[in-house]
Amino acid sequence: MTTLATEPAAAGVRTESDGQQKTIRLVDTSLRDGNQSLWGATGLTTGMVEAVGPLLDRVGYEAIDFTSSTGLAMGVKWHRENPWERISRMRAVMPATPLSAITTGMRFMSWEKASETVMRMALRLMAGHGLRRLQIAEPMNDVDSLLRVAQWAKEEGFEQVVAAVTFTESPVHTDESYSRNIRAYHASPYVDSLYVKDPGGLLTVERTRQLIPGIRQAAGAKPLELHSHCTTGAASHLYLVAAELGVDVLHTGLGPLSNGTAQPSLENLLGNLDALGIAVQADREAAAAAAEILHTIADSQGLPAGAPTEYDLSFHVHQVPGGMISTLKRQLGELRMLDKLPAVIEEVGRVRAELGYPIMVTPFSQFVGSQALMNVLAAGSGQERYSRIPDEVVRFVLGHFGTPQGEIAPEVLEKVATLSRARELAVTPAEKSLAELHEEYARRFARELPEEELLLRLVLPQDQADTMLAAGPAPRWSPADAGCGTAPVTGVLDFIRAVHRLPRWKYLSVTRGAERVELRRTETGDAR
């Protein structure tokens, strides 16, 4: 760190045009990216985020990276919680700080590409319930697609749109292509801020020095943000370099929802910026109190805290982002095949190259990860790679999500071309208007559906929507409730009382003498 403070090249960069020292601003990622990267997007309930919200509101963040379509869907699936209620309740306890959603563009909850009608409805409802900021990370770095969604977001009520260039490493992605995109976003009246999104944690200190100056210049007067992951162990260091090179806003996590495969911790970043003499906007007392609540949540639910990561160059080969690693671990754990994780990760690198080097960000990281998992399972049973191809990969190869910057391997094109399923998916269904969708679902349910319910039934399995709607309001949570998750249970009645105090429990551990019983709720809601 000492060399950073003494490098003359950076000394004059951290100033405004009037010579005043620039102050670094912050976006908190704990509740969205931290939860997704470290806890598989299932760790936090509405009551939990609501409990920590007032403290986060005091920190002085530029925004809270609060949710995504994946996060909202997992709330429905795992906790039977209404996503619109979650947004509204959080907005009520955080009036000062903008709540942000992230989208990859033309997708909402479902892996399938959404129509304009569905996307506009999703944007309208998110903004209407209290989200003020939208981060768009177009997974192909497709300028036209991103700007189209940016315009819709503004028209449907979002106050701020932040456009990303999604960083990756491949033979076909260049610094000039990133700067070219930034210049196009800078010129758009629908884009307020710009950011570099590094989902795989692939940036290094050296790469940051190469990349950021050109992007900073292309961004002009618009704010520039940086979002990276600690997956390779480099992010905490490169954040300091980025601050010196003119990045205005850094994305960080708090307490247990930082480090690991998530973002650098605010606690560590503050100390490092202090050491370099770089001013930062943050109420440290409020941040510490918020982190304490998050630690209480982690301890009460048996959830692992993110830990600092050793420098690891292997991620530059497979480029699996933090959230995807968490998901792969969960999937393989459910199959009792966690020992296959290294083989799956190695296969991810091969599949990505064969699919034309898609950027490893949602939804493409999931597509590549699913195909890699299927290839490893196929090899284990004596079958060929690509003997099974999920619909999402077929659609990708057919060009439903755009054109990758690299070429798709001929053998993959040939395998997809022989599938009867590919011929079915090649037919693009006609897009329905909002009025047509309302009419169709009113007939199906014999009543007019409010737009909030209509959208959820369009994008979610019907049983999940039914169960969530029947569950009623999400229970409140406070740190005092955490005790029932850790206090000793000495009898059947104690156990029953504890379960009733945790109506949405996901994991319970009961110890009596030398005996220990652990219960985990499955996706269907059954205990095992």
Image (cartoon, rainbow, N blue to C red):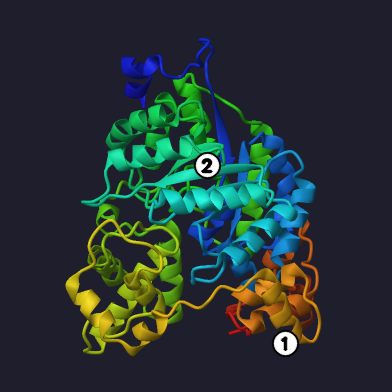
- Residue at point 62% right, 64% down? 72
Amino acid at pointer 2: Thr
| Viewport quadrant of the N terminus | top left
- Residue at point 24% right, 58% down? 406
**Which residue is tagged 1?**
444
Q: Nearer the viewer, mark 1 or mark 2?
A: 1
Q: Is residue 235 above or below residue 515?
A: above
Q: Position of residue 211 (x, y in %)?
A: 32, 35
Q: Residue placed farthest to the top in the image?
A: 19
- Residue at point 46% right, 54% down? 145
Q: Residue placed farthest to the left in the image?
A: 410
Amino acid at pointer 1: Arg
Q: Position of residue 114 (x, y in %)?
A: 53, 67
**Which residue is tagged 2?**
252
Numbered-mark total: 2
Q: Position of residue 119 (x, y in %)?
A: 59, 62
Which sits earlier in the primary sequence, circle 1 or circle 2? 2
